[in-house]
Amino acid sequence: DVKVTQSSRYLVKRTGEKVFLECVQDMDHENMFWYRQDPGLGLRLIYFSYDVKMKEKGDIPEGYSVSREKKERFSLILESASTNQTSMYLCASSTEGLAGGTGANVLTFGAGSRLTVL
Amino acid sequence: ILNVEQSPQSLHVQEGDSTNFTCSFPSSNFYALHWYRWETAKSPEALFVMTLNGDEKKKGRISATLNTKEGYSYLYIKGSQPEDSATYLCASLTGANNLFFGTGTRLTVIP
């Protein structure tokens, strides 16, 4: 019954490494999102994508890039990991824009990837 | 970035107690209010989404209300059970995909 799958639950990387976080959804959703969650802060949007090859910056895109080559897959890339990118990363998807239709669209989340950068 | 506040940060209740917590959000440019439940080691799951002032939603023992004019939503849990232990997140939607989350209320139900 898994709908949004994140490839790694736990990762440990070194400063300067290139890191890929993968997310796959099997619900044919149009929109996909990457958030990060840090203690004492709400989930913050890094990037989202509303279609294949389309992306929009969220609130904290610096240091990240994304790739969406296929509808079901949305990758978050840390070009050169830094210690301040140690965090829990959550992928989510929605069937259409959250404000679309009646505005009642919700996010379906993955279980998260906890990244530690040493 | 929108300032969405949740209170309390955490609380412990005895099994069988009823409880409630608050989500405050700016009332300008409001589109929808989301509630999610996030159990440890699991994915956050949507509980409710509300759009209209005065909306009330219910799912089993959990219900929520919305006041868009004053910018708050309450989440109520009646007769708390240990399986209700989780972090409850609220988020305010202000545009197409501009969903701003609070820091959550962590609920622990003691058997």
Image (cartoon, coloured by chain):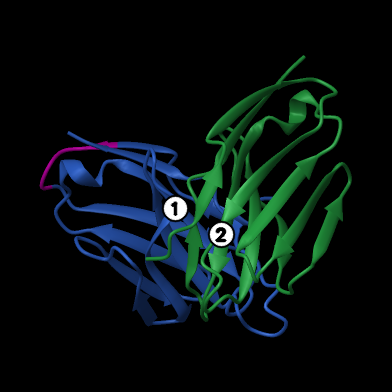
Chain colours: A blue, B green
Question: Is B88 above or below relative to A54?
Answer: above
Pinpoint the chain carrying mark 1: A
Q: Distance between the residues labelled 1 and 2?
A: 9 Å
Q: In the displayed image of the protein, which residue is found farthest to the front?
A: B70
How far from the left and from the top, in percent, is residue A81? Answer: 17, 49
Q: Is residue B83 above or below residue A104?
A: above
Q: Which of A38 and B67 is in front in this view?
A: B67
Q: Residue B91 carries which label?
A: 2
Q: Which label belongs to residue A106?
A: none
Give the residues in magenta: A12-16
Residue at which label 1 appears: A43
Q: How crowded is mark 1: few (under 14 residues within 10 Å), some or many (20 or more)?
A: many
Q: Is residue B29 left or right of residue B19?
A: left
Q: Mark 1 is on which residue type?
A: Leu
For the C terminus of chain A, give its image quadrant.
top left
Task: Work out whether disc 1 and disc 2 sit on a shared chain.
Answer: no
Residue located at (15% from left, 46% from top): A82
> Is-magenta flag for residue A15?
yes
Instruction: Name above or below for residue A56 compared with residue B23.
Output: below
Q: Which amino acid does label 2 sit on?
A: Ala
| Tags 1 and 2 touching, CB below 8 Å | yes
**Chain ID at mark 2:** B
Magenta stretch: includes residue A5:
no
